[in-house]
Image (tube, rainbow, N blue to C red):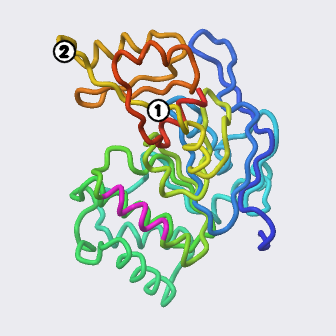
């Protein structure tokens, strides 16, 4: 197991190869290196197909890398995969809840699987149910829960054994905005109060605000490993908004602007278009006729500059 000075996850030059639809090999994870320490919430961000799920499955020991090395809790992911899986909390995209069992019965099942019994189990149940506000629903069938409540129950089951590390693969997909915020609040509590290390993948750029660090993946590669503020800073001074001219739809105007060389991104927002363009670039002159107004950059702007 780890000491305070050792990372919970240590990935070094990790590579995973798959064949594409034509049978040609491609790197789903390509030379990825990073570390995660106790008490950190690290967000794994990127679009679909970036390699996020593959990387998480490699870390859990469910897959073997074709190159590099992965240490989890100071255990080798290939030689000690079963020990890793018994020691961490893992919540895949389709978490294995039993919909014909109640909330409590699901938790009891996962507690037995991890050898948690007696007073320790009851104390843990009370803490988890309170933190997730599921106390009133312990007798409800899991299949009758809302999407957000199912994710909370999945999180409870992942945490029932008090693991030092939890990995969550897109836990907020299809969940309403309020439940999304509640799930992140719960993760921050566990990270802060119990020192749990958290690696959570998401394609929602706004969720970067909940993370201590963000790992940005694209086409299997790690483009940046930094706090969210550093990603946002990449787009400082690049963002402007322009009002859509009369007679044009915002989408038409956005397409016209996106085709201008030098414009990194153009996104319609109501009757305006938000544009990312480097300071001093000639494309700026073409925008002057639309009276551009400076805009404060956000995480998605910084992400787009990386691409």
Say what secondary structure mark 2 lies in.
loop
| Residue 274 in the image: above or below residue 111 | above
Based on the picture, tell me whether residue 73 belongs to the magenta stretch. no
The answer for how far apart the CA atoms under marks 1 and 2 are is 22 Å
Residue nearer the viewer, 48 or 192: 192
Q: Badge 2, how many Cα within 10 Å: few under 14, some, many 20+?
A: few
In the displayed orientation, state which residue is furthest to the bottom. 119
The residue tagged 1 is: 239
Look at the image and give the residue range highlighted in magenta.
Answer: 179-188
Residue 155 appears at what percent x and percent y? 44, 63
Q: What residue appears at the point 52 percent right and 31 percent down from the top-left corner? A: 238
Image quadrant in which you'd find residue 256: top left
In the displayed orientation, state which residue is furthest to the left. 247
Quadrant containing the N terminus in the rendered view? bottom right
| Residue 15 in the image: above or below residue 146 | above
Image quadrant in which you'd find residue 69: top right
Q: What residue appears at the point 56 percent right and 25 percent down from the top-left corner? A: 278
Q: What residue appears at the point 81 percent right and 70 percent down from the top-left corner? A: 5
| Residue 294 in the image: above or below residue 190 | above
The residue tagged 2 is: 246
The answer to which of marks 1 and 2 sits earlier in the sequence is 1
**Mark number displayed over residue 81:** none
Based on the picture, tell me whether residue 180 belongs to the magenta stretch. yes
Residue 292 appears at what percent x and percent y? 38, 26
Say what secondary structure mark 1 lies in.
strand
Residue 120 appears at what percent x and percent y? 51, 86
Residue nearer the viewer, 296 or 175: 296
Residue 105 appears at what percent x and percent y? 35, 70
Q: What residue appears at the point 49 percent right and 19 percent down from the top-left corner? A: 284
SS assignment for the magenta stretch, majority: helix
């Amino acid at each position: 197991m780890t000491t305070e000075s050792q990372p919970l996850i240590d990935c070094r030059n990790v590579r995973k190869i798959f064949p594409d639809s034509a049978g040609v090999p491609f790197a789903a994870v390509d030379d990825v290196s990073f570390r995660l320490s106790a008490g950190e919430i690290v967000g794994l961000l990127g679009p679909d197909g970036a390699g996020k799920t593959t990387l998480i499955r490699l870390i859990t020991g469910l897959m073997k890398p074709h190159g590099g090395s992965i240490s989890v809790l100071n255990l080798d992911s290939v030689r000690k995969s079963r020990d890793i899986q018994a020691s961490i909390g893992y919540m895949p995209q389709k978490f294995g809840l039993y919909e014909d069992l109640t909330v409590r019965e699901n938790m009891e099942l996962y507690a037995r699987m991890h050898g948690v019994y007696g007073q320790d189990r009851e104390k843990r149940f009370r803490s988890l149910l309170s933190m997730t506000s599921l106390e009133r629903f312990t007798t409800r069938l899991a299949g009758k829960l809302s999407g957000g409540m199912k994710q909370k129950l999945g999180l409870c089951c992942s945490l029932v054994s008090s693991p030092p590390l939890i990995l969550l693969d897109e836990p907020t997909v299809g969940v309403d905005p309020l439940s999304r915020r509640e799930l992140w609040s719960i993760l921050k509590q566990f990270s802060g109060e119990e020192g749990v290390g958290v690696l959570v993948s998401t394609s929602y750029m706004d969720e970067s605000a909940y993370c201590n660090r963000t790992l940005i993946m694209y086409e299997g590669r790690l483009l940046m490993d930094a706090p969210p503020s550093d990603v946002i800073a990449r787009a400082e001074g690049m963002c402007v908004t322009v009002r859509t001219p009369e007679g044009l739809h915002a989408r038409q105007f956005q397409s016209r602007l996106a085709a201008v060389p030098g414009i990194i991104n153009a996104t319609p927002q109501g009757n305006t278009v938000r544009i990312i363009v480097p300071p001093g670039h000639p494309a700026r002159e073409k925008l002057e006729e639309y009276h551009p107004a400076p805009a404060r950059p956000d995480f998605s702007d910084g992400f787009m500059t990386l691409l």
